[in-house]
Image (tube, grey):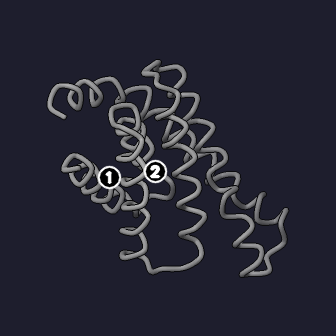
Amino acid sequence: MLMTAYFLTIIFVMELSLSFLPNIQVTTLLMIVFATNYKLKYVVTLTFGYVFLNGMAYGFSLYLVSMLVGWLVLNVTINLLHTRNLHVLTLSSLLFGLFYGMFFVPINVLLTGVDFWAYIMADIPFALLFAASNILTVLYLYKPIDKIVRKYG
């Protein structure tokens, strides 16, 4: 459980330090590293903790439900795949980057009244940026970070 707290701290601090850049982050990479190295109960705990910290930092709202569902889908899927295959993990990060924003569509459409297709079209550049960030970080940083976590974690 201590490693969950350490990982949660690192993920959250890294996200805050990169928050001035739109959709550029290492959160997906770090979540994947955690999900490939720890039991499902710790992965779920980390996910809830991450979403809670986001609520503490940015305010609690219905958006956190979408965030929780999105991150749970990624983390539980990666954990249940039981793989460290870099191609599988990179593909998973790409798909997550492209579709994470879709978890927010229902709430945004309901709360703001924005047109569904207008929202989707406006989100495309951000989804592409998120996907590219995920691909690059997982492709180049997963193995070295995973090696450190397996050695010391």
Q: How far apart are marks 1 and 2 (CA)?
A: 13 Å
Q: How crowded is mark 1: few (under 14 residues within 10 Å), some or many (20 or more)?
A: many
Which residue is found at the position 66% from the left and 58% from the top?
Answer: 103
Camera-nearest residue between 24 and 152 = 152
- Find residue 2 and name its label: none
Say which element carries label 1: helix
Quarter of the image for the C terminus: give it: top left
Q: In percent of the image, x 77 and y 73: which residue is there?
A: 109
Residue sitting nearer the eye, 135 or 54 = 54
Q: Is residue 96 above or below residue 50?
A: above
Which circle's residue, 1 or 2, is located before the other in the chain? 1
Q: Where is residue 92 in the image (x, y as percent from the top left)?
A: 57, 33
Above or below, comparing residue 7 to residue 39 in the picture: below
In the figure, residue 131 lies in which quadrant?
top right
At horizontal 49% and vertical 41% (from top left) the residue drawn is 133
Q: Where is residue 14 shown, x and y percent of the image? A: 30, 54
Looking at the image, how many numbered discs can be counted on the residues?
A: 2
At horizontal 29% and vertical 54% (from top left) the residue drawn is: 8
Q: What residue is pinned by disc 1?
A: 11
Q: Where is residue 77 in the image (x, y as percent from the top left)?
A: 55, 37
Q: What residue type is disc 2 on?
A: Ile
Residue extending furthest left?
152
Q: In this view, does 91 lie above or below 133?
A: above
Secondary structure under the numbered disc 2 in the rendered image: loop
Q: What residue does disc 2 label?
A: 24
Instruction: Using the image as rendered, state which of residue 23 and residue 146 is in the foreground.
Output: 146
**In this rendering, the label closer to the viewer, 1 or 2:** 1
Q: Position of residue 26 (x, y in %)?
A: 39, 45
